[in-house]
Image (cartoon, helix red, strand yellow):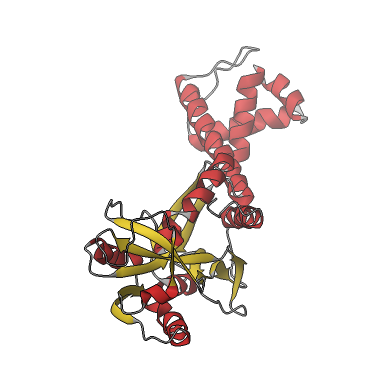
Amino acid sequence: MDIKDMKYFLAVIEAGSINAAAKRLHIAQPPLSRQMKQLEENLGIKLFERGNRKVKLTEAGRLMQDRAEQFLGQIENTIREMREFDAGSRGTIAIGTVTSSGATILPRVVRVFRDSFPGVRFQLWEGETNRIIELLNRGAIEIGIARFSIDSELYESIKLPNEPLVAALHINCAAYEKNDKEFIEFSELAGKPLLIHRKYEAMIIEHGEQYGFTPEFVCMSDDVMPILAWADADIGIAIVPRTAIGLIPSANLVYKTITNPYLELTSNVIWLRNRYLSAAAHNFLQLFTTLSSKSLLVDK
């Protein structure tokens, strides 16, 4: 028994007779009649009551009808799902992201994306940039959000808007001034205990030399969460991306944009060149490109 047998069997039931079914199927009646008889012989059981113009199913025939409808329905569903996968409206997208972007930029894009593709699911990995690149290289994720420059020969990318660094200060910190000033000049960080992501070390040292001081690093980490926690404990001033604001809900922390100079980070959405990307991932990247080009990923 094959799919064709099932389709012809159901066509006979729908039409009410073998003759009517043959007309619908655009085949001669005798071959269809023989095929139904052959189906019964192959199964070793009667499916039809003979002798009437109208089709009358045996109990086994009714069971066969039920099973054939289920089976063909599953095939149709599978074909539809495969087409949906090909169109990118179903499937799972594995994304790796640095922590701050995963908590701010990414949810904005996913919310808009799910309006058009509610059938797509996500797997999310978080870590610092080297971890994201490692996951991307071994195929654990399709898309990464990473900071700093990327090797354009290995990766394709979408450049995200530059992001300023901010200083997270405890309200009891000596550098915190209770006024309406929303910024802190870089020179004001001289002699202050700093908590930084180790990726910022070279940049901050370079600017410190320009302003005649050597920055005092109390802690360097691969993640912004620990240094925010230390700032919340009034151990030092955490220097973090603006998207890190609010990662630790705390009434003790205030954030000031660092100016003179204005320190910025470069971020990219990246994926490997010459590697298969699912249709869902293609759709997601297209949305990222659209939102980034319209500056909809920037806090107003």
Q: Is residue 46 visible?
A: no
Q: For this view, does 25 lie left or right of residue 253?
A: right
Exactly how many numbered labels are in the figure? 0
Where does residue 153 sit, x and y in percent of width and height? 62, 80
- Which is more toward the observer, 176 or 216? 176
- Which is more toward the observer, 109 or 205? 205
Q: For this view, does 171 lie left or right of residue 126?
A: left
- Which is more toward the observer, 81 or 98? 98
Q: For this view, does 257 lie left or right of residue 219?
A: right
Where does residue 259 sit, x and y in percent of width and height? 49, 69
What residue lies at 36% left-to-right and 53% top-to-bottom? 246
Q: For this view, does 211 lie left or right of residue 287?
A: left
Q: Is residue 98 visible?
A: yes
- Which is more toward the observer, 241 or 159? 241
Residue 223, above or below 115 = below
Residue 175, above or below 5 = below
What residue lies at 55% left-to-right and 34% top-to-bottom? 73
Question: Residue 285: which quarter of the image?
Answer: bottom right
What residue lies at 26% left-to-right and 63% top-to-bottom? 229
Residue 202, above or below 240 = below
Residue 268, above or below 243 = below
Where does residue 205 sit, x and y in percent of width and height? 42, 84
What residue lies at 39% left-to-right and 73% top-to-bottom? 188
Where does residue 240 sit, x and y in percent of width and height? 40, 66
Quarter the N terminus occupies: top right
